[in-house]
Amino acid sequence: MFITYNPFAGLAAYGITPGMMQIFVVLAVVAVALGVILDVLHKKSAVYFNEHTERMKKLATRQLSSSEKTSMLVQTILNEVLTSSEFHNPKRRIAHLLKMYGFIIFVISSAVLIFFYPTSESAGIWAILWRIGAIMLAVGGWWFFTKLRVDVLAEGKKWYKLARADMFIVSLLGVSTFGLLWCFFQGVVGSAGLGLLFFVLFLISAVVLFGGVYWSKFAHMFFKPAAAYQKRILMADGSRENLPPFYRRAEVLDQSTMDLVRDIPADQKFGLCIMKDEPNHY
Amino acid sequence: MPTFVYMTRCDGCGYCVDVCPSDIMHIDTTWRRAYNIEPDMCWECYSCVKACPMHAIDVRGYADFCPLGHAVRVHRDEEEGIIAWRIKFRGGRIKDLVAPITTKPWGKFIPDLKQVPAPTKEQRESQLLFNEPKYIRLDDGDLYTLESQGLKMRQGVYY
């Protein structure tokens, strides 16, 4: 049955053994680890975050307890990591969640299929999860790529104009889309030629995705949570990255700067600012 | 003082690209982060500084009067309708300013000109424009002064 068909089992027809697939997965993990380390060394991001933390410590007005830090770590995991709360654009947030969870499901199910069901034509729930992950990744990815990418949304460029910054999303799209097409043509249509074509494209995408970590933004999934946690700490310890203190409207009504707008009717005094208006210049 | 972007804070949302009236805030093609492509052409309106939800845009001072070590930071709070600025001088002196956000959605609070009385002959011949800010009008009881408006100088306003 197509829905539980394991595409990796059909690779034997192309002379690819389970051992070769398993070596590929191990190499991919090593490549990601190496790529992240090289990325950190090259961009000096760890050094920067450390220096920034030290600089901000001097501005801190209070010391955070270990329970507060633990609470912030939990909040970071719940908000920034699990629900992508840092995105202010809800569409971008939904697309990111689709891509993130799709990628996780897709990668885990691929590893399970390769290591535990490399020759089984039917792989039950893991084959279904592999499809669900790929579909989520493709839907979120294509939505982001064609509509939500800042080049398209703000810069007004055509969606098919590519730059180096697109390496990560294009390789994700390749892995998910070509993976689904390979599975479909190999398992349902039974077309060995088209199946092989899409498998080769899938393989190239996977090599670019896992082997190109140093050049792509793959590493963001490791340092973004750390940056979000650091930001929470800096906001809570009073250093606030040099930002002004938090004001309530009622507290500032008698401030001198409010004199400038005292002739404006009360209902017009406090606007909603630019974020409430969608830009419509394209 | 033109603006610049802390690329480690920017998440490439593109709000600054949308809002920049000089069209000089753009997205870097390698890292997909915003940057000011031409600081010399910056109007210094600080729309991008105010628009950035990640507080990633700051102001670069001219070297002759604020060489290094200064910061101009802003926090825009839409729930409260308040925009707060912190100017940090090189010597560590800090000035906090707070103001209401007065930007309105397009099409709202446009004056209904039909309801406005026609201008008098003197008004027509005046150098002043319609809706000239009240603070610079001379035909409305002379210039607005602190005394005439019942205001007084407060700490933090003067240097």
Image (cartoon, coloured by chain):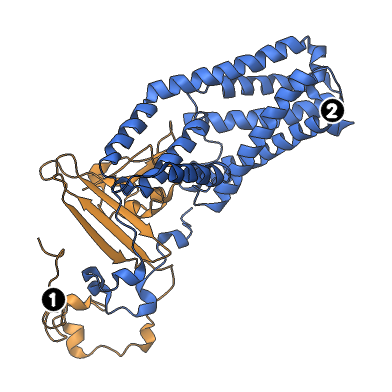
Chain colours: A blue, B orange
The residue tagged 1 is B152
Residue A184 image offset from top left, x and y in percent: 80, 29
Q: Is residue B38 visible?
A: yes
Whole-angstrom CA distance, mark 2 to mark 1, is: 80 Å
From the viewer's side, name the closer residue of A268 and A109. A109
The image shows residue B151 at horizontal and vertical percentages of: 15, 78
Residue A73 screen position, x and y as percent: 49, 41
Q: Residue at x 56, y 47 (%)?
A: A93
In this rendering, position of residue A71 left or right of residue B46: right
In this picture, residue A16 sits left or right of residue A60: right
In the visual, does A253 lie left or right of A93? left
Which of the 4 image quarters holds residue A1?
A: top right
- Residue A270 in picture, x, y percent from top left: 37, 71
Q: Residues within 10 Å of mark 2 (few under 14, many from 20)?
A: many
Chain hosting mark 1: B
Q: Is residue A272 above or below residue A245?
A: below
In the rendered structure, which amino acid carries the disc numbered 2? Tyr
Residue at x 30%, y 47% (from the top left corner): A239
Mark linked to residue A226: none
Packing grade of label 1 (10 A; few <14, some 14-19, many >=20) is few
Q: Check the residue under mark 2 and report the chain it is in.
A: A
Q: Residue at x 35, y 48 (%)?
A: B23
Under tag 1, what secondary structure? loop
Q: Which residue is mark 2?
A: A5
Q: Is residue B10 above or below residue B113?
A: above
Q: Nearer the viewer, residue A167 or A117?
A: A117
